[in-house]
């Protein structure tokens, strides 16, 4: 019960577009209802955070046991995850509403084993879908699906991260498509044409929505174009 509570509560959302605020404050009894820290006791929040830490430790220990049976001289191991959890940030618990703030969208992704240049941390964002062409290339196979938004990260695994300088996308099938371009991240609510734009270098907590700043109008228009192109592809990236 000694878990530190996240800084900043529900008030961090004040500058978001109205559709996002509506989703955050939705109180309807759905199969996946919104869970807010303000509706819970402090003891409950601390207990949930302790459970999350315990589950992470359990996974870490289990992976360690598995690797005792793997020959890393001829094997490459990938580790990633499905999605994150608000864990009390933004005044929210669980994963609802599924708006791709970094609490949900930013997940672990690391690789080690045969031929991998280890001991490095690359901060440039990638997409989970990039795993597929990466694994195929490392296996000596060709990615057979032209036109899908995925690239092989194999060059980055051996030291050349220049391949990773491109826009990355997330959450294109649930109404809140996101594009990340360098330091800027844009979540676009298509139906209301409203944006939550963040400079993640100066604002890693995603607390200041820059979308109303005229200086970013050209960027928002380019983001719309990029997202529309991904949405019109044969199969959108989840």
Image: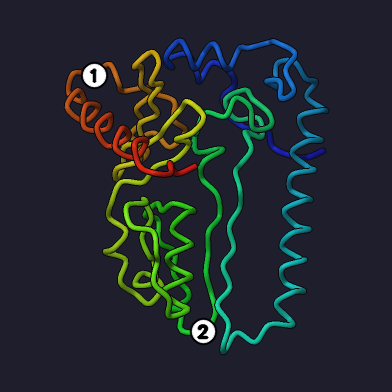
Disc 1: which residue: 213
The quadrant of the rendering that contains the N terminus is top right
Q: Is residue 68 left or right of residue 127?
A: right
Number of residues whose C-alpha sits closer than 10 Å to that of mark 1, classed few (under 14), some (14–19) or many (20 or more): few
Task: Give coordinates of residue 199: x percent, y percent.
Answer: 33, 34
Looking at the image, residue 62 lies above or below residue 21 = below
Looking at the image, residue 56 lies above or below residue 181 = below
Looking at the image, residue 154 lies above or below residue 98 = below
Task: Give coordinates of residue 68: x percent, y percent.
Answer: 73, 81
Compute the Cα span from label 2 to label 1.
48 Å
SS at circle 1: loop
Please report the residue visible at 47 percent of the width from the left and 54 percent of the height from the top.
129
Q: Of callouts 2 and 1, which one flags the residue occurring earlier in the amino acid sequence?
A: 2
SS at circle 2: loop
Please report the residue visible at 17 percent of the width from the left and 27 percent of the height from the top.
218
Please report the residue visible at 51 percent of the width from the left and 41 percent of the height from the top.
105
Task: Give coordinates of residue 38: x percent, y percent.
Answer: 70, 16
On the image, which quarter does residue 190 sit in?
top left
Q: Nearer the viewer, residue 19 or 103?
A: 19
Looking at the image, residue 237 lies above or below residue 205 = below
Disc 2: which residue: 114
Q: Which mark is drawn over residue 117? A: none
Q: How many marks?
A: 2
Q: Is residue 39 left or right of residue 158?
A: right
Please report the residue visible at 34 percent of the width from the left and 75 percent of the height from the top.
159
Q: In the current view of this chain or complex, which residue is farthest to the bottom?
A: 73
Q: Is residue 193 left or right of residue 171?
A: left
């Amino acid at each position: 019960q000694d878990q530190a509570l996240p800084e900043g509560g529900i008030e961090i959302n004040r500058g978001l577009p109205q559709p996002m605020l509506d989703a955050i404050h939705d109180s309807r009894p759905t199969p996946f209802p919104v869970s807010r820290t303000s509706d819970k006791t402090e003891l409950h929040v601390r207990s949930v955070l302790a459970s999350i830490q315990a589950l992470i430790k359990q996974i870490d220990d289990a992976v360690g046991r598995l690797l005792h049976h793997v020959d890393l001289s001829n094997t490459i191991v990938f580790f990633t995850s499905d999605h994150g959890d608000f864990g009390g940030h933004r005044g929210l618990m669980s994963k609802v509403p599924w708006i791709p703030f970094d609490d949900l969208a930013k997940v672990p992704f690391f690789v080690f084993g045969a031929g991998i240049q280890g001991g490095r941390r690359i901060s440039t964002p990638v997409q989970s879908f990039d795993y597929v062409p990466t694994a195929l290339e490392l296996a000596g196979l060709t990615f057979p699906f032209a036109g899908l938004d995925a690239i092989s990260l194999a060059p980055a695994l051996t030291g050349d991260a220049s391949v990773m300088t491109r826009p990355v996308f997330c959450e294109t099938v649930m109404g809140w498509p996101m594009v990340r371009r360098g330091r800027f991240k844009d979540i676009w609510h298509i139906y209301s044409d409203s944006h939550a734009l963040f400079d993640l270098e100066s604002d890693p907590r995603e607390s200041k929505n820059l979308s109303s700043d005229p200086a970013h109008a050209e960027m928002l228009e380019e983001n719309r174009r990029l997202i529309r192109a991904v949405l019109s592809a044969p199969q959108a990236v989840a």
